[in-house]
Image (cartoon, rainbow, N blue to C red):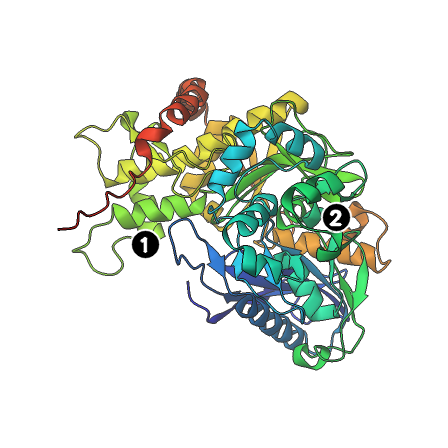
Amino acid sequence: MSDRPRAVAGRGDAAPPAEIVIGVDVGTTATKVTAFGVGSRWRHTVVREYPLLHPQDGWEIQQPEVILAAALGAIAESVSRGGASRVIAVSLSAAMHGLIGLDTDLRPLTPLLTWADSRATDIARRLRAEGLAAELHHRSGTPVHPMSPLTKLIWFAEHEPELSGRVRAWVGLKDWIVQALTGTQATELSSASGTGLLDLNTRSWSPETLAMVGVSAEQLPIILPTTAALGLTRAVAPRVGLPTATPVVLGAGDGPSGNLGTGALRPGVAGLSIGTSGAVRTVVPEPYVDPGGRLFCYALTDDAWTIGGAISNGGATQRWAGEVFGRPDSGADSSTDEQTLALAATVPAGSDGLLALPFLMAERAPLWDPTVAGAFLGVRSRHTRGHFVRAAVEGVALQLSVIVDELDAVHPIDSVRATGGVFRSDLWRTVLAGVLDRPIVVADGAEGSARGAAALGLIGIGRAASFDSALALLPGPDTGTDRLTNPDPALADTYRRVRADFPRLLSDLGRVAELFRPAAPVPARSG
């Protein structure tokens, strides 16, 4: 992934409007900053990309300073693209579950450990074996998994005690950006609810959990509402081209923001997003922790909560399959997404019996077992490159279908609003609609989380009183461009048969996970 800037042309009305609200979506591999015309269809998106680093097996890290520079650069360009428009607020969304240790000067002592970092796998397994996982999940809404800051903090205490002792503050990705923009060390309820350290009942850090992981509340940011507004500092304001004290609204995590931005807010509607990873969420009015332990519960606001499940292996799975099963002797363009998806589209539904369990990175929902490795099942000599790519797409959709089934048990899901670059592909849309056997509406634009952030920004500065009124001030650039895909009955019937066995296959693979774990290295003999 390159760190070069990439701009997406403005859309909708030709001229920038009088007022703009800026939604900042700090993601895993890119920051997307969208300027939204208030009460206008005008918008403009700027993208800054950066790498996800893998220094050791299971380590998935990033440099906080690199992400901050990307965010500031994208905000500055977004402001300049708005011309004479007045920016009334900057509002934030960010990837959840990251962890950074800061020194006494509040500078990074550690890299950003992203949600994908699985170094705390043994910690999570131990907490489950000790019978603590269910209690921690019920208290916080966050499943026990190496993604969570809770397990990462224990890992630092046990593996890096000297470094851990020098940490003045532990913060997440959003908190790091908030600190840089406003000079205030603060988090918000949504990001806090994804740490594993929150008490859902009190909406504050849990003393019992903090004592277990060995950190104090003074080492963590204060928790503010997702609509809280702070002011841009005098030091940062000129770097982004805005006046000092411009409101910076904290916003929510990227998943909850995505539900808001795509309008997936009413009971029975699920918000589904696929990027590098993927997730399905629905909104409920108060915290809910399912007894089976498969769903997370993260805040959007104090009285709107998202429940659902996230998978670690989303669009990246299809890209991996295209690269691995591409033709190496056909030139640099032989395995582009478009070409591999076109090839996969020639393969019948069900991939002629080939089934992918797409666990390339430590998986999250629905098993929450990061040790389970992926597999292709039913491989035969008739299977071609197209079969493997299509099976990868179908495997991701099947994973998401298990989460939708879990949400069905809470409130029946009748439709899905989807967002993500993969849905530019007809294959992704038809496969997902067929597997879920529900209509899929691909929400207009790729700014779901940024639009959700902008909506919270309007509420935070008092320009809107509700989600609906905020979204009404941020209309899409082209009315009626949401794309509806109804399930094809024949595809739905084929996938229904596969879905019937899929949960059992997941459980079976979990039981034989030991077969897929690397053997310990054999020490060399001396002499």
Q: Nearer the viewer, residue 495 or 10?
A: 495
Q: Is residue 122 visible?
A: yes
Q: Who comes first in sequence, dot 2 or dot 1?
A: 2
> Could you say where residue 499 lies in the image, as x and y percent from the top left?
44, 22
Say the numbered circle drawn on residue 117. Answer: none
Tell me which amino acid carries mark 2: Leu
Q: Nearer the viewer, residue 177 or 281?
A: 177
The residues tagged by marks 2 and 1 sit, at their Cα atoms, a distance apart of: 40 Å
Q: Secondary structure at mark 2?
A: helix
Can residue 348 be seen here? The reply is no
Q: Helix, strand or loop at disc 1?
A: loop
Q: 486 above or below 327?
A: above
Q: Residue furthest front?
A: 527
Look at the image and tell me in which quarter the N terminus lies: bottom left
For this rendering, which residue is in front, 396 or 217?
Answer: 217
Q: Against 5, is 284 above or below? A: above
Q: Amino acid at mark 1?
A: Thr
Determine the residue positioned at 60% across, 23% down: 292
Graded by Cα atoms within 10 Å as few (under 14), some (14 to 19) or many (20 or more), the crowding at tag 2 reads many
Quick check: 225 left or right of 161?
A: right
Q: Answer yes or no: do the residues labelled 2 and 1 have beta carbons within 8 Å?
A: no
Instruction: Count every numbered label the image shows and give the total.
Output: 2
Which of discs 2 and 1 lies nearer the camera? The answer is: 2
Q: Residue furthest left?
A: 527
* Quadrant position of residue 351: top left
**In the rendered image of this protein, does residue 4 appear above or below residue 359?**
below
Q: Residues within 10 Å of mark 1 (few under 14, many from 20)?
A: some
For label 1, the residue is 336
Residue 235, percent from left and from top: 72, 80
User: What is the quadrant of residue 283 in the picture?
Assistant: top right
Residue that label 2 marks: 189
